[in-house]
Image (tube, rainbow, N blue to C red):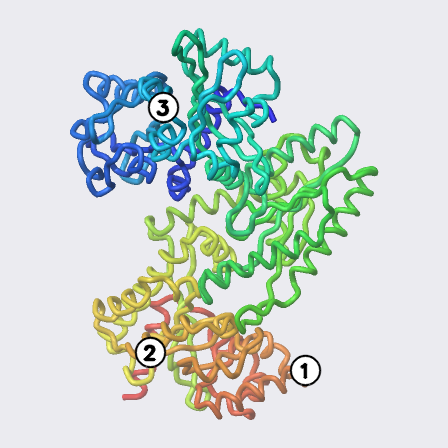
Amino acid sequence: MGFLNDIAERKQFRRYILDAWQQYSTLKSLIKEPLILIDVRTGRVVDINAAFERVLGWDMNQVVGIPIADLGIWKDPLRVKIINLVLKKRSIKLTDIQFYNMDGDVLTGELSAKVVRLNSGLAILATFFYSHNLLAVEQFFDVDDMEFSSAFDPIGDVVIISEFESAKYIKVSESLREILGCDPSELLHKNEFDLGIWASESERKVFLETVKTEGAKLLEAAMYRPDMGYMPIKFMVDIFTANGSSFVLMVGHDVTSLRKAERRAIHLAYHDPLTNLPNRTLLYERLDQQIKLVQRYKLHAALLFLDLDHFKNINDSIGHPIGDAVLKIVTTRLKASIRANDTVSRVGGDEFIILLARLEGDFNDVERQVLITAERVREILCEPMLIDAHRLQISTSIGVTIIPEHGINTSELIKRADIALYKAKELGRNMIATFRSSMQSAVVQRMRIEAKMRQALQNKEFKLCFHPQVFSRTHEITGAEALIRWVQGKDIFSPEHFIDILEETQLIIEVGEWIILEACRLYAKLMNNKAISLLDFKFCVNVSPRQLQHEGFYSLIERAFKQYGIPKNAITLEVTEGIVIQKTNSIIEKMCLLRELGVNFAIDDFGTGYSSLSYLKKLPIDMLKIDKTFVDTITTDIHDAGIVSAIITMANSLDFEVIAEGVETADQLSILEEKGCYLYQGYLFSKPLTFDSLQALLVAQSSRQI
């Protein structure tokens, strides 16, 4: 194997390693060249690697935290020149630089330095590649082989001296045995070509002529080791004269680990570390190539933009380890559902893009092919997953773009696939939508809503209204569900118009906090106005899994109770059945802590999910809410009526309260009462009311009771 001239290649190597420092700090241990990190602001040493300790003699504890000027690696004014030069150019490489070890010995070599950004600010990352002092080589040139090896083996590098003209080996250090697995004495009867340093005599001649005129040069050779194959050895090559003859000095070390680190850094730059799928950068490159092929050969290609529906609920409810496991299973399923020349990439937390390459046929044929593939992907992802005793079932929404009909610009194609994905979500999720130009206006509208919502809290545009909860036997209002409304001028928006945006932008935490505080404030107002009996009146407030999992949620509830002086059982938090489905101990623990604080819990929309009764009894639940979908058909569908009966019976046996939502007719209420459910809310009694209207009803009710 021939050598690689290291000048251009070394620049590339440095760029990869230095750019990767911040993200892959463990690579420093693999770099066999001395490396030091210096804080720009303070001028103090931040870090060094093991090679720095070995070559220059300082221990990390002696170095880290001290000013670089006190270390004395470079003497002034060279030190100042180097620092200023790297700060000015951001990246430098200097040859024939003298630096000093801890004992004050002079070493000569190459310095590479670059400005990098750390959490604390800017730093200079410098590495050294040094050549051994030629005087030392000449000093030991005439000694026997044993003394030669003993002089150079402690540095751990290969030291080779050969004749300039014949390339015959004259001196070889013992360290060659460990690195290449061969007996150094056997090499003394051979030349440089036998070891595989050079590909040809002409190659050697050209390189050494350059060394003659320009001085010592770096060289990387792929040398053969019988038990390991070819391995890269980095040499510093120089020429010296002794006894009237010219000799070649080569000092080198094994850079296999360094090359592996480089390849790893390159791989990480183009792949997602969790799933090992191509990342957005690699997808863009492949998409660029595919667009060119499509245009050249009159073919088609397509993008499928996937988003896992409600994936955040898994992370929030069960935890990120389970979420990561889900993503890995999704990865396996996606790879199994496409062809070998297609690409699956992960471009976000729960977002994947599939590039379908080299599709033949007209647009209609291609669209049919693509939609068949998309449907196959959707179905395979819907199959249940069993992870650590959690039985999970996810769905996915998919947006589709066809190339070239929907564009030939990489960014525009992905943007349009994202627009189609939004349409699929708008259709109810677990759907597939192909891009149409008419979709753009809907996306623009959504962006406007997002921008306005970010200002809504500050502008106090959110309001609470209340849906009364009634005990049918006495017709008394015993509580009310707090419902958020977004008021924009004369327009009033209910949650179905914006709740998804709140969840996706994580504004749900801020808005959810406002809802809790506002509900407590208004409850306190009812107390002060003597509109309620504290024994049996409650506000119900909906909370999402994301809110419940948020680290500040417990302290928020505690603070709200103290701030407004309301009873701790005044608020019932309504959680969805999804929390029960996830079967997570962390959710149960948080709910139990809140229960100890006095908070009550209700399961909202009960019966619409996949409840686990074994976990239901473990949760600190006080109430089940029968979903409106069952109430709507309770008078006409015997199956729904049976489900309602079962829910009421189960609630009674577990000592839960039960309330029916969406009661609109007297017949519905009559059947519910027959089955043992006497709490209800719905338009039969009242539509959602403003706070003032609710308070007026409660004051009148309180007056009647007196």
Q: Is residue 522 above or below residue 216?
A: below
Label pair 1/2, CB-CB below 8 angstroms:
no
Q: Is residue 230 left or right of residue 557?
A: right
* Horizontal and vertical percent position of residue 453: 42, 49
Q: Is residue 539 above or below residue 277?
A: below
Q: Secondary structure at mark 2?
A: helix
Name the residue tied to disc 2: 595
* Horizontal and vertical percent position of residue 561: 25, 71
- Is any part of residue 701 visible from this angle? yes
Amino acid found under the numbered disc labelled 3: Val
At x 68%, y 45%, the residue is 400
* Horizontal and vertical percent position of residue 265: 48, 38
Q: Is residue 295 left or right of residue 579?
A: right
At x 18%, y 27%, the residue is 69
Q: CA distance from mark 2 to mark 3?
A: 85 Å
Q: Is residue 239 above or below residue 190?
A: above
Q: Nearer the viewer, residue 24 or 391?
A: 24
Name the residue tied to disc 1: 636
* Horizontal and vertical percent position of residue 199: 61, 21
Amino acid found under the numbered disc labelled 1: Thr
Label pair 1/3, CB-CB below 8 angstroms:
no
Q: CA distance from mark 1 to mark 3?
A: 107 Å
At x 44%, y 69%, the residue is 688
Label pair 2/3, CB-CB below 8 angstroms:
no
For the C terminus, which image quadrant?
Answer: bottom left
Amino acid found under the numbered disc labelled 2: Arg
**Label 2, residues with CA under 10 Å away: few <14, some 14-19, many ≥20:** some
Quarter residue 532 falls in: bottom left
**Sequence order check: which comes first, mark 1 or mark 2?**
2
Q: CA distance from mark 1 to mark 2?
A: 39 Å
Name the residue tied to disc 3: 143
